[in-house]
Image: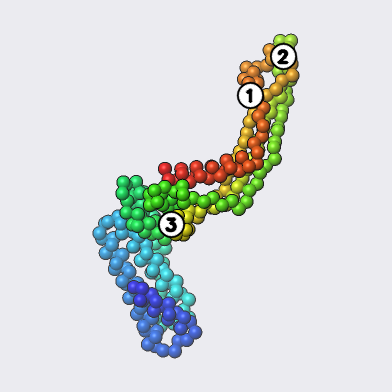
Amino acid sequence: MKRFHLLIALSACILATSCSTNQRLYKTGMAYHQANQADHERIQALKATGSPDIWFEVFERYCSIKGRSDEMSHFPPEVKRQINYRPINVDDELNGARNKAEAYLTAKISMALNSEAPDLDYVDKLIKDLERVNCNNSRITDFKLKSMAKRYGGIERLMHIEVFQQQVGPNRDESVSFKESNGNLTATVTDHRLSKSATIQGKVNFINPRNKRMLLSLPYEMTSKFEHTYSTIEGPQEACSEQTLENLKQRPVPFPTDESLIQDAKQKVVEMVFQKIQ
């Protein structure tokens, strides 16, 4: 199959600028139709088995058919006429095979990683197959992290956090004042809300401790927030509601330093990674 595909690709380069020989056209047409026929027969044989593990190969076969058809579509019209080219639309079949392959691979990888002694080389192959089927699958990163954790006995010593950008907000003290009364007693209550935040952006790199080779790199953006509320009054406490009296138990606290918020954001990045391998 790959030989036929290569011949088509090479012929495409030649025939796009020259239609000089009937023999070349004949070979190109034969390679195209024979490769499609071989893929079609293999797809039908796989489907006849009824096995759930066929769908990645079926997906790959449909990709080959679509790829050839797309390549041939760029040939000059006269070339396409002489080799009896007809566009092949397998989009629906390809998407159906993609969905089934993705579902099978996701379940297979998850089951393997949850076993006591998984074959990690096989697991990593399945993860690569899943990336081929859908590189945007939301579980790929989690699978890679779990595989690394099992292979290296944890990921703590693999993890290196790079910070490319950091932004720390100002100290904010927002307050609202209002009056509360109880009989002839009146007090002015002020509710305070302290807040500050720090956001960091960068990458978490996972590096093989033996050969220092990069195993995986994940971008991140993480925010650490400080928030604290308390109340103060001017006047008798007897004028205040139960809620205000409860709020009065909270005392002012100092704003955290910029560095402490940044360190807290880094710790949240670490916690995020560990949640993925739970």
Residue tagged 3: 210
Return the disc, 1 or 2, that comes first in the chain's sequence: 2
Tag in front: 3 or 1: 3
x and y, in percent, of residue 187 in the image: 73, 17
**Residue 146 rendering spot, x and y as whole percentages:** 41, 49
The residue that appears at 54% across and 53% down in the rendered structure is: 203
Q: Which residue is mark 1?
A: 250
The residue at 45%/71% (across/down) is 70
> Earlier along the polypeptide chain: callout 3 or callout 1?
3
Q: Is residue 84 visible?
A: no
Which residue does the numbered mark 2 point to in the structure image? 236
- Disc 3 and disc 1 in contact, CB within 8 angstroms: no
Secondary element type, mark 2: loop
Question: What colouring style does the render use?
Answer: rainbow
Q: Nearer the viewer, residue 46 or 272?
A: 272
* Left or right position of 108 against 277: left
- Dot 2 crowding, Cα within 10 Å, few <14, some 14–19, many 20+: few
Mark 3 vs mark 1, CA separation in Å: 52 Å
Bin the neighbour count of mark 3 within 10 Å (Cα to Cα): few under 14, some 14-19, many 20 and up: few
Residue type marked 1: Gln
Left-right relation of 19 to 220: left
Q: Position of residue 25 (x, y in %)?
A: 40, 84
The kind of residue tagged 3 is Arg
